Image: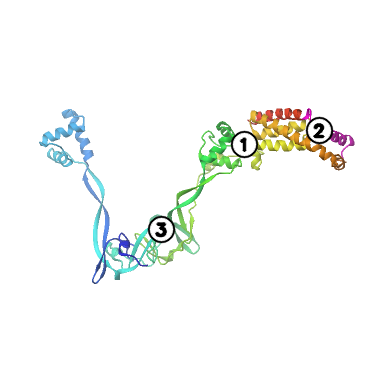
Amino acid sequence: MEFKPVELIGAMVVDSEGYIYGRAAKIEIRPEGPAFKIISVNTIKESIPNIDALTQGLLEDFKSKYSIFSIQELYKFVAKELKVQSVTENDLISYAKLKEIAIPIKEVSKDVEEEKPSIHLDDIEAMNKSEFGSCILLKTSIEAMMRGVEPNKPVLYQDEESLKEKLVIDNLARILGKVHGIVMGADGLRVVVSKESVVKKLVPDMVLLKKKLLSENTRRDIIKDMGLLGFQNPEELTDEKLVAYAKMRGYEIPSRLESVKAILLYKTSVPWEQLGRIGDVVLLKRTLPDIFEEELKAEEPKSITARLGTSAQKPRPQIGATSISFLTRPGSFALGMYLGTFLTIFIGFVPYVGALFSGGVAGYLARGWARGAIAGFFSCLFGTIILALISPLLLSMGLADFLGMILAYLPSSVVDAIKEMLYAVSSLFPYTLVLINASIGLVGGLIIGLIKS
């Protein structure tokens, strides 16, 4: 690859043993060729006076000696003793030395820049750029020699802790990511490489989900139902619990796109034999294809008691609960109406019992005595109207004879009774049957809805 000189400013410079020589601070085009000025930033620890501790120590000592109780009073006293207008940190130190008071010491870290010998194009093995920045690989082990590190050939095995989070650089000087871990197979150890990236993911849209749930149920109803399903502390309606509850009750979970940080793993792991060198970074003998998979969070091993405790907290479906979502969806008033009407059309000709059963089903699905009563009333009302309207048509098409044929195994008296009911439905419609069935449906919906509320 080719780069403008400005693109290499700040590039990480790594020697052939995998040790970081520094960063390119400046590139000068000289008559003999380009020269890279290298700056290395070293973190050193140094001991300095602990001014805060010194101030508190003086204040504690002066409380009893001079009745000084605040820092301002302490500074005024020291200024008067030293005959200065205002007190600096150095003045406090000078006063402590004057009075032969021990000065507390603390260690601090400090970054110190060090200019190193420049490098030239002849020293460079490869240079490249990736999303993690620019990198320059050197032909020589200049940094390793400066540190007195002996090269290891071949690369000796290391444990995961010593490798994890080290940068991984391929033979083309491309920074691929970091060491994620070590895996083992029959062919030996392999290194897994990962990189952190921002990805678009579908996540539950909790605003829409809560709006949907609370439009059909009260908060109290949801908490009560979650308790029946085995949720621990159902009164704590966390997002995770609500999503799990909605899935169990057959709701479609609304989702939205969100940018989240994710750990992406290279699908191709690196055999140990393909590690070129291990120093501050890990150098590879080859590169890796840009094929990734998202990291899966592995569950930490738990004790038997912890596992039992976790399993006891998982939501448990009620005994005998069906897996059909529309039967378990809480508070579906519209569904109660539809199914109640449908049942009334088919069994409404059975006096009282048909309407009572249809209204009860509507009330069961509607959940709640008020909604159950309304669903039972209107489902039986509409169902009976439809039944009464189509009964004459069905009778004219020979429905009675058809029923007699398919119910031939029943006693003739029963078959005749069913036929009479059909004729009764047709004749009673204009007057009483609609109100009778609707009233009975109201009672059935009221009773079952009250039980299920």
- Relative to residue 307, is residue 83 drawn left or right? left
Vertical comparison of 375 with 143: above or below: above
Q: Where residue 369 sits in the image (x, y, percent)?
A: 65, 28
Q: Secondary structure at mark 1?
A: loop
Q: Secondary structure at mark 3?
A: strand
Foreground pick, 324 / 378? 378
Which residue is at 24% across, 56% downward?
A: 113
Instruction: Locate residue 255 relative to residue 111 in the image: left or right.
Output: right
Q: Which residues are magenta?
A: 409-433
Nearer to me, 409 or 423: 423
Indicate the amino acid at tag 2: Val
Residue lying at 77% horizontally and 36% vertically, measured from the top left: 387
- The circle on residue 177 is 3
The disc at residue 425 is 2
**Residue at point 76%, 30% (across, down):** 434
Distance CA(mark 1)–CA(mark 3): 49 Å
Within-10-Å neighbours for mark 3: few <14, some 14–19, many 20+: many
- The numbered disc on residue 330 is 1
Judged by depth in the image, the label closer to the viewer, 2 or 1, is: 2
Q: Quadrant of the C terminus?
A: top right
Give percent across and percent down for residue 425: 81, 33
Res 285 → quadrant: bottom left
Q: Nearer the viewer, residue 74 or 144?
A: 74
Which numbered mark, 3 or 2, is in the foreground of this view?
A: 2
> What kind of residue is marked 3?
Gly
**Secondary structure beneath label 2:** helix
Residue 435 seen: yes
Q: Which mark is residue 316?
A: none
